[in-house]
Image (cartoon, rainbow, N blue to C red):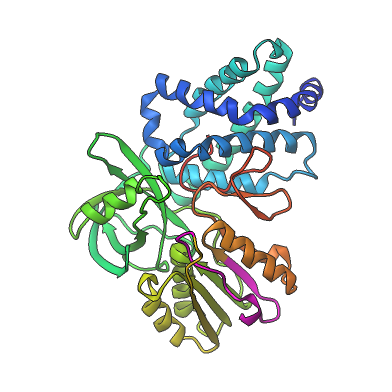
Amino acid sequence: MLSPVSAEVVRATLPVVRDHAVEITGVFYPSMFAAHPDLLDLFNQGNQASGQQRVALASAVVAYAGHLLDPAAAPFAPIAERIAHKHVSLGIRAEQYPIVGRHLMAAVGTVLGDAVTAEVAAAWDEVYRLLAGELIAAEARLYERGGVDPLAPWRRWRVAKRQDEAVDAVSFTLVPDDGDPVPDFAPGQYVSVVVDLPDGHRQPRQYSLSQGPARDSLRITVRRVRGRDDAPDGVVSNHLHDRLHADHTILVGPPAGEHTLAPGTGPVLLVSGGIGITPTASMLDHIARTDPTRRVVVAHAERSRDRHALHAEIDHLAAGLTDTDVLTWYENGGDGRPGRIDLDAVPLPEGVTAHLCGPLPFMRHVRDGLLRRGVPADRVHYEVFGPGMIDNAGGIGAASGPSVPPVSRTGTPW
């Protein structure tokens, strides 16, 4: 809880900080990287170049400050859980937080200048220290629960199998190269992988696990990111497609992610767009192996059949269930992404819990349709690939400003 003095200062200065938050984080990142170039290996440089990461960090700090001022109106626990899982997947350590704090506060002073009095600096430093403490504690619990040493989170895995799934989509089945057991995970979680690029830089990315747990391997399914509208190709996805083959090894972090299959035996709706089918495949695989009588509806949208990754596997798994529907829409959304799903054609069993994964506009459309048809908001869960946003009411937004907190899982929120 903020001290009364700091709370008064933060309340008075929050509008100014909000208005300049992206400018502040824009100063923060170059300063921190110049002083600590090793931290470049922890950040998705594509999101850095696009500016999305600056928005994500600005949003997180502003959202947390609002939460401290009014916890009931601005709950932060789901955001903290999301960030903590992401940090654990990357091996973020407690001793790195003060580095971020120093450079972030210096950036505040650089941007706001003389407006940052000693009292203002102390109040916002308190906000950051409270945020850091909350995240460090959450991450420590996750490290302990997963049996992960934060000083050595990365393990070397060998590619046991590489399989083309569709146009620009390939699966890698991974087995431990160190002989240690395959970690347990929850259906819907992801892992970070690290690649050493030809320019000497190391880059991490997160990929959903595309098969269920309790096997002797992990599997990721990666879509090659092709640049469009002057954006470059995805560096890591193209590296994996072009250079990672059977018997090669790769560094992999621990499974993480809070968007997991709803517990219990109630009906489930799995909705995906494009490569968002990967967590659907993991969840469906788990259901088929552990609860084949559970009512399941699978709905997927793709640009075309030849781009539909894992479709044969999804059909095979669904055939092993006793009560399932599988619906597919093939349509180009006009921006190179899958088109919309006709929500009125999707069966919605009583008490259904929905899991969504795909591009932000796609998921906004799906979520709005589900709410319109009476599915409660707390039964609509979703996974966002990239630094997307969730608004304070729980709706899916866009990375457009610092008024909403981040749900990115392709880099840190810093």
Asked whether, in this view, residue 353 is left or right of residue 66, the answer is left
Residue most extreme to the bottom? 322
Whether 354 is among the magenta residues is yes
Q: Residue at x 50, y 71 (%)?
A: 301
Q: Position of residue 214 (x, y in %)?
A: 40, 68
Task: Give residue 296's quadrant in the image.
Answer: bottom right
Q: Residue at x 53, y 27 (%)?
A: 26
Asked whether, in this view, residue 323 is left or right of residue 344, the answer is left
Q: Position of residue 241 (x, y in %)?
A: 27, 56
* Residue 242 seen in this snapshot: yes
Q: Residue at x 69, y 31 (%)?
A: 18
Task: Give residue 174's quadrant in the image.
Answer: bottom left
Q: Nearer the viewer, residue 161 or 52?
A: 52
Asked whether, in this view, residue 9 is left or right of residue 103, the answer is right
In the figure, 380 relative to 61: above or below?
A: below
Task: Give residue 268's quadrant in the image.
Answer: bottom right
Residue most extreme to the left? 247
In the figure, 164 relative to 19: above or below?
A: below
Asked whether, in this view, residue 205 is left or right of residue 403, the answer is left
Span shown in magenta: 335-355
Q: Position of residue 186 (x, y in %)?
A: 49, 62
Q: Nearer the viewer, residue 18 or 93?
A: 18
For the N terminus, the quadrant is top right
Whether 359 is among the magenta residues is no
* Residue 156 seen in this snapshot: no
In the figure, 9 relative to 187: above or below?
A: above
Q: Position of residue 169 (x, y in %)?
A: 33, 64
